[in-house]
């Protein structure tokens, strides 16, 4: 069966490390799915409290600000809901407690599609070291999707809360060096860019202008690979 024939229409669970990661990595795709009527849920795995270069920044206040920014961005994307874990920025690890939180959401949402980032991506080009939280988030998502989500012997205490095991049929990993799927997001690039702009604490100075120029250029480059105006790239795993 082709990928197109296996197109999903059920709920989506996106899990990324920081507020603003989902918009940068997959904002067009998430907006497209929400517009098509899919319930799109987001779980942010850190509170983003170190997302500043200022030495006098109040980290607790910054985390609160970033949650409000994520809420505003989510309205533009069309999220059904979002949640943020309390893990401090820069301290995310692929440990049982974090996996349990993601597994819990998998069992609650029962998504057709889980979206995260590729944990194998350490370097992007020759100018960027992928953030430790990004790599950890990707590993958490992959391990939560399989084997933990569908195996009742992982986090069995959740079954007592009425949550049955769930094997996500698909996992889509953004920021991959080995993408095998390019999703047409023509018509949704502006949603992606404007949602990112809501993360004002991060998009200071020339940063937002950089993304306003780079995101369309990147989407155009990816789009040429499938003959559309704009696309986003993923490593797509079909698990059913």
Image (cartoon, rainbow, N blue to C red):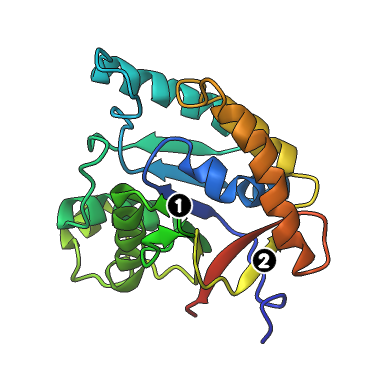
1 vs 2, front mark: 1
For residue 195, what is the image quadrant? Answer: top right
For residue 64, what is the image quadrant? Answer: top left
Residue 109 — which label? none
- Between 97 and 159, the residue placed more toward the observer is 97
Residue 43 place in picture, x, y as percent:
40, 43
Report the side of 25 relative to 123 (left or right): right
Report the side of 106 relative to 61 (left or right): right
Does the rendering let one see residue 195? no
Tell me how many marks there are. Answer: 2
Q: Earlier in the sequence, mark 1 or mark 2?
A: 1
Rendered residue at 57%/25% (across/down): 206
Counting other residues with Cα less than 10 Å from the Cα at mark 1, is it few (<14), some (14-19), or many (20 or more)? few
- Between 208 and 194, the residue placed more toward the observer is 208
Rendered residue at 53%/54% (across/down): 12
Report the side of 39 relative to 185 (left or right): left
Identify the residue under disc 2: 182
Question: Disc 1 and disc 2: Cα gap in Å?
Answer: 24 Å
Rendered residue at 61%/48% (across/down): 30
Q: Is residue 191 above or below residue 221?
A: above
Residue 44 place in picture, x, y as percent:
38, 41
Are circles 1 and 2 on residues that touch, CB within 8 Å?
A: no
Identify the residue under disc 1: 127
Residue 154 place in picture, x, y as percent:
20, 67
Does the rendering let one see residue 30? yes
Residue 58 place in picture, x, y as percent:
25, 14
Counting other residues with Cα less than 10 Å from the Cα at mark 2, is it few (<14), some (14-19), or many (20 or more)? many
Mark 1, secondary structure of its residue: loop
Rendered residue at 36%/51% (across/down): 134
Mark 2, secondary structure of its residue: strand
């Amino acid at each position: 069966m082709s990928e197109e024939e296996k197109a999903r229409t059920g709920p989506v669970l996106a899990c990324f490390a920081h507020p603003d990661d989902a918009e940068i990595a997959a904002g067009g795709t998430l907006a497209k799915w929400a517009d098509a009527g899919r319930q799109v849920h987001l779980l942010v795995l850190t509170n983003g409290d170190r997302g500043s270069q200022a030495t006098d920044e109040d980290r607790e206040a910054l985390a609160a600000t970033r949650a409000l920014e994520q809420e505003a961005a989510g309205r533009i994307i069309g999220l059904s809901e979002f949640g943020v874990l309390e893990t401090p920025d820069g301290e995310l690890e692929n440990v049982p407690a974090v996996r349990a939180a993601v597994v819990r959401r998998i069992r609650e949402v029962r998504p057709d599609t889980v979206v995260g980032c590729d944990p194998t991506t350490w370097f992007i080009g020759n100018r960027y070291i992928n953030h430790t939280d990004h790599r950890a988030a990707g590993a958490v998502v992959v391990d939560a999707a399989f084997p933990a989500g569908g195996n009742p012997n992982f986090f069995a205490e959740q079954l007592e809360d009425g949550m049955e095991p769930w094997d996500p049929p698909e996992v889509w990993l953004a920021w991959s060096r080995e993408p095998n799927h390019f999703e047409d997001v023509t018509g949704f690039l502006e949603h992606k860019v404007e949602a990112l702009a809501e993360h004002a604490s991060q998009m200071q100075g020339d940063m937002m202008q950089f993304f306003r120029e780079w995101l369309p250029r990147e989407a155009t480059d990816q789009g040429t690979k499938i003959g559309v105006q704009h696309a986003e790239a993923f490593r797509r795993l079909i698990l059913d």
